[in-house]
Image (cartoon, rainbow, N blue to C red):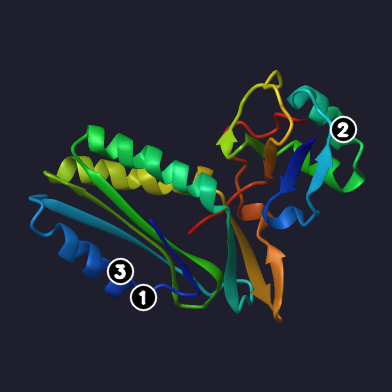
Amino acid sequence: MVKVEFLGPIGYPSIEVEAANLADLAQKLKEIEDIKEWLSNSAVAVNDVIVDSLDTPLKDGDRVSILPPVCGG
Amino acid sequence: MELYSGPLDATEIFKSWFNREKESNYGAFITFVGIVRSEDNIEALSFDIYEPILKSWFESWQQKANQRGAKVYMAHSIGDVPLHNVSYVSAVLSPKRRVALELIDEFVEDFKANAPIWKYDVIDGKRIYAESRSTPMSGAGLLN
């Protein structure tokens, strides 16, 4: 199982899902109505490292973070 | 990198950075102060931070600065910061002014674009995500 956490304003509780890679996870997240709209402008981190490929493999115990648009300062 | 709950005491933070570095032989010390401004009836701004990624973002900037003989500092607030208080301070030190002047620009702009910090307006005690002022991070939309 992979743990997915939704940061900042998304305000959705963490979930645990089965996913072999990020493409697989994307399919599962698109099925969640409250999450779908955030996917187009959110960055993704696996175990606290920002990633840029849907081929990124996921293994049991990995943590995926969904990071919506930011504004510090 | 320093994180504080609520407003920052900018003068105390700069004093501690200055005292730490005054013997380090940097010729330039350039600071930036972010102050909460009155606009659209807000009472305060409020911030969420994801610390693990903020830390790695900051460390990569420290490496970039080091490669140019410079050093960066930053501090940010977590939670509510009322009007006319400070929520963000940063600084760049370098042997000569030019590198620090260029780096403070790049460092503060990249901070706005890629530091994992979320801003909310506080109006009538309610926190409202500052969506229109927020920027998608590099690589956003991967799962779309």
Residue nearest the viewer, comparing B138 with B4: B4
Is there a contact, CB below 8 Å, between mark 1 and mark 3?
yes
Classify mark 1: residues with Cα within 10 Å, few (<14), some (14-19) or many (20+). Answer: some
| Residue in the image at 44% along x and 76% along y | B85
Residue farthest along the top direction in this orientation: A55
Image coords of residue B33 (percent x, y):
36, 64
Could one spot residue B140 in this view of the protein?
yes
Residue at label 3?
B13
Amino acid carrying label 3: it is Ile
Residue under numbered circle 1 = B9
Residue B109 quadrant? top left
Q: Amino acid at mark 2?
A: Lys
Mark pair 2, 3: CA separation: 45 Å
Pinpoint the chain carrying mark 3: B
Residue drawn at 53 percent across, 53 percent down: B51
Instruction: State the SS at label 2.
Output: helix
Label 2 packing within 10 angstroms: few (<14), some (14-19), many (20+): some
- Where does the N terminus of chain A fall, quadrant-wise? top right
Q: Which mark is residue A28?
A: 2
- Examine the rendering and report whether any part of residue A42 can be seen: no
Residue B84 figure quarter: bottom left
Q: Residue at x 77, y 57 (%)?
A: A11
The correct choice, above or below, for B88 with respect to A64 in the image is: below
Mark 1 or mark 2, whichever is nearer to me: 2
Q: Are marks 1 and 2 in contact (CB under 8 Å)?
A: no
Q: Residue B3: horizontal and vertical position, in percent? A: 45, 63
Would you call the spot at circle 3 few (<14 residues within 10 Å), some (14-19), or many (20 or more)? some
- The location of residue B42, given as percent across then percent down, is 62, 75
**Pair 2/3: label in front:** 2
